[in-house]
Amino acid sequence: MLELKLVNFKNYEDLEVSFSPQLNCFVGMNGMGKTNLLEAIYYLCMTKSNFGTNDRQMVRQGESFFRIEGQFAQNDKIVAKVIPGKQKKFERNDVAYDRLMEHIGEIPVVMIVPDDTQLVSEGSEERRRFIDTTLSQLENGYLKMLMSYNKVLKQRNAALKGMGKSGYYDDRLIQTYNEQLLTPADFIYQARKKFIAEFLPVFQRFYQVISNDAEQVAGEYISKLAQESLKKLLIESEQKDRILQRTTVGVHRDDLKFMIGGNPLRKFGSQGQLKSFVLALKLAQFEFLKQQKEKKPLLLLDDIFDKLDRHRVAQLIGLLLEQDFGQIFITDTHENRLEKIVEQYATNYRKFTVENGRVLG
């Protein structure tokens, strides 16, 4: 990314900033707008917030719209024009996309934030989201199938809930939804299975580097579709689904099981190991996207000092710059802390001071 322009986005009224092609550091106190800059870049790439923030919450207070423009390499200009509840348009070189999903994957991106530890410490939803975000950037067909599956799943769950309230069970309607779930579910399962098999060795290599070969780590993709077809699983779970009024089997229940030293990571991993594990997952995500897309994703690192101690941050930045991870954006609350580490490795970098919606540097 060469340049970013914001109008009415979060706490930015009107901003235009140019970037280094290698490393960009945003420093400033909490609440000044550092993370908002990373969120704007992510939004341009993925058409949505990394944090699950809805579009209304991204409009500057008192305004009705926001606009984000990014100038990328090869004279690629991406513009997002959003009036929440009325319009959400993405343009590439002044030509609007017919569907937002067509843009996903055109500019690959990986974002690392302190809350990423939820990937290993919370429920399966975060781990499925990690897989889906990666695969959606790799293959537009995957995102299409995922959206199709989720749409039918939502309809089936609504029908089960409605039938529970009315006391009338419409078997034919449920069977119709069952049939509509089969094709996208099989596609998603096969794509996830293939991805995990190829991804895990990349992840393990990064973990060994970050942890200095401290321990062995592993992962396993968990899905009931490995044993039975979804068609059979839906038949077997019919009574359970009726009682609970929701769909209890399918790829929306899949998970990733993480191990460290042969033991479950969630139970036996220390805080340092959890942080190293998540960091290795995200860097492997970057490497996997780079290999598959044959282009380097943008790498966004938000408040990494909250995630790692100073030594590990220095080790990480050294790894990123020595292996040429492409264009990197980092935020930090301490003006000199990050710069002292960066100066050891980088010659081509820019430091920006962020203060109350203004960016200086």
Image: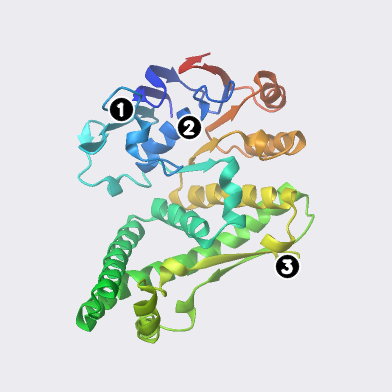
At label 2, the amino acid type is Leu
Q: Quadrant of the N terminus?
A: top left
Sequence-wise, which precedes: disc 3 or disc 2?
A: 2
Alpha carbon distance from label 2 to label 1? 16 Å
Q: Is residue 116 found left or right of 233 in the rendered image?
A: right
Work out whether residue 109 can be spotted: yes
How packed mark 2 is, by other alpha carbons closer than 10 Å (few <14, some 14-19, many 20 or more), is many
Quadrant in which residue 53 is drawn:
top left
Q: Looking at the picture, does residue 20 appear above or below residue 158?
A: above
- Residue 161's spot in the image, x, y percent? 30, 69
Q: Looking at the picture, does residue 246 appear above or below residue 128?
A: below
Foreground mark, 2 or 1?
1
Is 184 in front, or is 355? 355
Alpha carbon distance from label 3 to label 2? 35 Å
Q: Residue at x 45, y 34 (%)?
A: 39
How packed mark 3 is, by other alpha carbons closer than 10 Å (few <14, some 14-19, many 20 or more), is few
Q: Residue at x 57, y 47 (%)?
A: 116
In the picture of the structure, the residue carrying the numbered disc 3 is 263
In the picture of the structure, the residue carrying the numbered disc 1 is 66
At label 1, the amino acid type is Phe
Circles 3 and 1: CB atoms closer than 8 Å: no
Sequence-wise, which precedes: disc 3 or disc 1?
A: 1
Alpha carbon distance from label 3 to label 1? 47 Å
